[in-house]
């Protein structure tokens, strides 16, 4: 399948590393102008260099901002007034005994993982619908469906993101704009490596990964962490003209972990 996104501008939040950077790289490879966002200027510059190392002809813009805040969203909007593709990848995660999660932690997870996405959809969706074309994708998680006991606050935020996606897809009905969720399973990033070792101990990585899957994700059919590029592949497809009939959906790259049908 040939995917051509030349002439499209794609905003990818939380894209200084990991899944976000892999998604931005995939979109750039399909010809899109990509906008990397994050809170640290040095890390964004490094990410842009990594992306250009893979895609030398890429058109890359970096915007330093904190998208968990209204001010950060305004700063991004000023730098990039219009976008054809919006990928809300920004998110935080961590483990905590359920009864120890504080009110402030609940608010922080909601603000960062949910409200940041809703805020940017409100900002960019009107322009997309006016032009008659656009793609919005919210990166969710298997934790939205199979809520882990050790990270209820994270699971809550990703479940809410599914509702945000479905609701805005209805708002965009019939306009040529699609809005979808991508449900990602446990993915191999630096932060997840730290998280895995937090749960299973400081084992050699291959052993730690196997122990994590055995103890905490036993339903996974691939029995390994997903690579960021595997998620990027689905995001690039959903960003393409070929995916014009897919909207309001929760698409899965979960390694077969979820064994129920997601509407």
Image: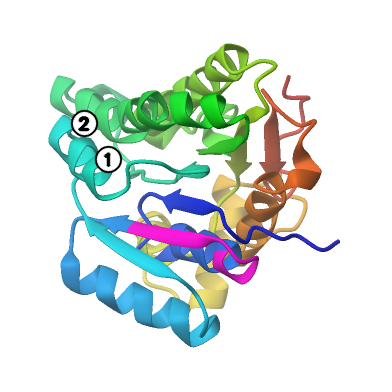
Magenta-colored span = 28-36
Q: Is residue 54 above or below residue 68?
A: below
**Within the image, what quadrant is residue 232 found in?**
bottom right
Say which of 201 and 66 sits in front.
Answer: 66
Disc 1 residue crowd, few under 14, some 14–19, many 20+, Cα 10 Å: some
Q: Please tell me the numbered disc located at residue 191.
A: none
Pair 1/2: label in front: 1
Q: Is residue 34 magenta?
A: yes
Q: Is residue 254 above or below residue 211?
A: above
Say which of 119 and 182 sits in front.
Answer: 119
Kindly identify the residue that appears in the image at 35 percent across and 34 percent down.
113
- Residue 141 in the image, given as x and y percentages of width and height: 54, 39
The reply, left or right, for residue 129 in relation to residue 59 is right
The reply, left or right, for residue 252 in relation to residue 137 is right
Query: Could you say whether the residue bearing mark 2 is in a helix, strand or loop?
Result: helix
- Residue 172 in the image, given as x and y percentages of width and height: 59, 18
Q: Is residue 56 magenta?
A: no
- Residue 242 in the image, given as x and y percentages of width and height: 80, 45
Q: In what quadrant of the picture does the N terminus appear?
A: bottom right
Kindly identify the residue that appears in the image at 45 percent across and 20 percent down.
160
Is residue 242 among the parts visible in the rendering? Answer: yes
Give the labeled residue for mark 2: 108
The reply, left or right, for residue 204 in relation to residue 71 is right
Query: Could you say whether the residue bearing mark 1 is in a helix, strand or loop?
Result: helix
Cα–Cα gap, marks 1 and 2: 22 Å
**Within the image, what quadrant is residue 244 found in?**
top right
Give the labeled residue for mark 1: 77
Q: In what quadrant of the picture does the C terminus appear?
A: top right
Q: Is residue 42 above or below residue 211?
A: below
- Residue 70 in the image, given as x and y percentages of width and height: 17, 30
> Farthest front residue?
131
């Amino acid at each position: 399948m040939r995917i051509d996104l030349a002439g499209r501008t794609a905003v990818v939040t939380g894209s200084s590393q990991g899944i976000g950077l892999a998604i931005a790289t995939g979109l750039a490879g399909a010809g899109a102008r990509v906008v990397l966002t994050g809170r640290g200027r040095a890390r964004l510059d490094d990410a842009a260099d990594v992306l250009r190392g893979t895609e030398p002809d890429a058109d890359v813009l970096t915007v330093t901002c904190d998208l968990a805040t209204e001010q950060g969203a305004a700063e991004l909007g000023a730098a990039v007034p219009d976008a054809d593709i919006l990928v809300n990848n920004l998110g935080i995660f961590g483990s905590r005994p359920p009864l120890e999660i504080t009110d402030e932690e609940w608010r922080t997870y909601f603000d960062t993982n949910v409200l940041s996405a809703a805020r940017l959809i409100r900002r960019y969706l009107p322009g997309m619908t006016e032009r008659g074309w656009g793609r919005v994708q919210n990166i969710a998680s298997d934790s939205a469906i199979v809520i882990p006991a050790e990270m209820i606050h994270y699971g809550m935020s990703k479940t809410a993101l599914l509702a945000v996606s479905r609701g805005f897809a209805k708002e965009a009905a019939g306009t040529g704009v699609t809005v979808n969720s991508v449900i990602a399973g446990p993915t191999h990033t630096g932060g997840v490596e730290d998280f895995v070792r937090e749960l299973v101990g400081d084992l050699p990585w291959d052993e730690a990964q196997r122990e994590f899957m055995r103890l905490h994700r036993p339903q996974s059919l691939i029995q390994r962490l997903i690579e960021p590029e595997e998620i990027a592949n689905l995001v690039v497809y959903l960003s393409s003209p070929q995916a014009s009939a897919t909207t309001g959906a929760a698409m899965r790259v979960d390694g077969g972990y979820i064994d129920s049908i997601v509407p």
